[in-house]
Image (tube, rainbow, N blue to C red):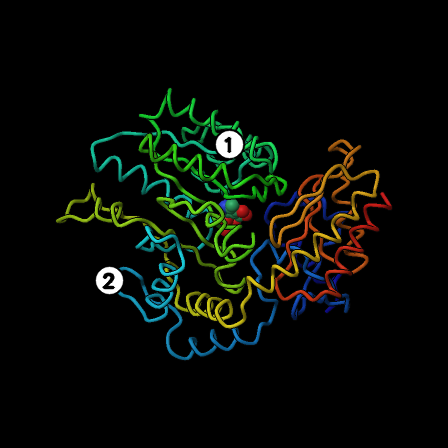
Amino acid sequence: MDNLSLMREDLKYIWHPCTQMKDHQRVPLIPIKSAKGVYLEDFDGNRYIDAISSWWVNLFGHQNRYIKDKIKEQLDSLEHVIFAGFTHEQIIKLSRRLIKIAPDNLTKCFYADNGSSAIEVAIKMSFHHNKNKNLTKPYFVSLENSYHGETIGALSLGDLGIYKKSYEELLLKSIKTPVPKDKSKGEAIKAAKKLEEIFKKRGDEISAFVIEPLVQCAGGMHMYHPEYLKLSSKLCKEYDIHYIVDEIATGFGRTGYMFACESAEIKPDFMALSKGITGGYLPLSVVLLQEEVYEGFYCDYNLHKSFLHSHSYTGNALACAAANAVLDIFERDNILEKNRAKSQYIAKKLNRFLELKNVESIRQTGMIAALTLKGYDSTQRVGLRVYEYGLKEGVLLRPLGNVIYFMPPYIITYDEIDKMMDVAYEGIKSL
Ligand SMILES: Cc1ncc(COP(=O)(O)O)c(C=O)c1O
């Protein structure tokens, strides 16, 4: 089989996510045959550095020996079991470990199987918990430029028109508040004042405030100061509004902390995790919550007070085995420390992009680095041109509009960082 024949066969049957399929009349779809470390290899023998960790999930490289062996081991005993009325060892172990490393007010885990569903769980739980206390609070507040997923609830919290606009009439009641404009403390304080104004006016109607901590990833890798986490969390406590921290993209070391909310030492009411949790091996997500919320649902049989939410694959044993392997690697290999040195190296290389006249700005938080292009309108689709250049030169750089970013697997070597960033540099220069 070769790339072209597989692409043709694929396009006969498949509608790909987040894709205008007509683009594939011109831009090739790439069938991947195998992958190892940071490299993907297609059916024509071309190799690409996975500079975006395959949509930010792959932490320790493709075909990671350790994670693979742990999944295989699990496969020999239990692949999956219904998670209502039954349990298994991997999920008990995983939950114990997550609770140990999460902020210490979080004591219970509720599982799902993708990020959007974890957000649905968190907002439903928040709303329902209030209802169990005879409070009806139908609104959610989230940040301008945010992204929390594609299911209707999660989409309602997001603020990116390209994903959301067509569904406006279907969405939940949500209020948007300004995100700090940049990484300065001053902007964080300004934005928190705006949030306070909303809470003052409508605090009684708001169940929860939902936030991507430190970095709005899908929103163009927009970064802000941890002071905003501190101030917004304080306001939520003051106004009795739940604080839901969406660590789906930022969790598991991506920002330089195990969880980004540690940067401000806050104690959220709910924390949603997914993506890197299994190192990119299998779908899994989880919402961590406080005992008080759990107890709010704990009662003698009462249909309306119970949280009767489920997904068929909740708590899949293979996914949990992968997640335990990921936590083993964090513990064993001192990943956060090693990432610090790599982040510093990436920072140095990122500075060079400012030499280019079509680069407006650069920014970085931990193992996320990004730059914004200037001088083009959206119809020129310059990001796509950088993407195509990258593929030709062996690097997968999937842009977000006119933002080019680097979010590689943590096992990337210094030579591979050089290649990843040099190709992006040349691609941008050639525009
Ligand atoms: C911050 C954030 N929340 C939620 C999601 C949704 O996760 P999923 O794509 O697994 O539904 C994403 C996905 O990119 C995300 O970045």
Mark 2 to mark 1 CA distance (whole Å): 37 Å
Residue 251: where, in percent of width, then height? Answer: 50, 53
Q: What residue sits 46% from the left and 47% below the top?
A: 261
Location of residue 87 with respect to 115 vertically, above or below: below
Q: What residue sits 35% from the left and 68% below the top?
A: 93
Within-10-Å neighbours for mark 2: few <14, some 14–19, many 20+: few
Residue 100: where, in percent of width, then height? Answer: 36, 61
Quickly name the residue at label 1.
167
Q: What residue sits 33% from the left and 49% below the top?
A: 289
* Secondary structure found at label 2: loop
Query: Left of 412 or right of it: where is 180?
Result: left
Q: Quadrant of residue 164?
A: top right
What is the three-letter code of the residue carrying label 1?
Tyr
Residue 139: where, in percent of width, then height? Answer: 37, 29
Query: Left of 82 or right of it: where is 349?
Result: right
Q: Quadrant of the N terminus?
A: bottom right
* Secondary structure found at label 1: helix
In this view, the residue farthest toward the right is 430
Q: Of circles 2 and 1, which is in front?
A: 2
Residue 177: where, in percent of width, then height? Answer: 49, 28
Query: Left of 168 or right of it: where is 358?
Result: right
What is the three-letter code of the residue carrying label 2?
Gly
Quickly name the residue at label 2.
85
Location of residue 189 with respect to 124 vertically, above or below: above
Q: What residue sits 71% from the left and 62% below the top?
A: 49
Q: Nearer the viewer, residue 395 or 309?
A: 395
Q: Are marks 2 and 1 in contact (CB under 8 Å)?
A: no
Location of residue 342 with respect to 291 vertically, above or below: below
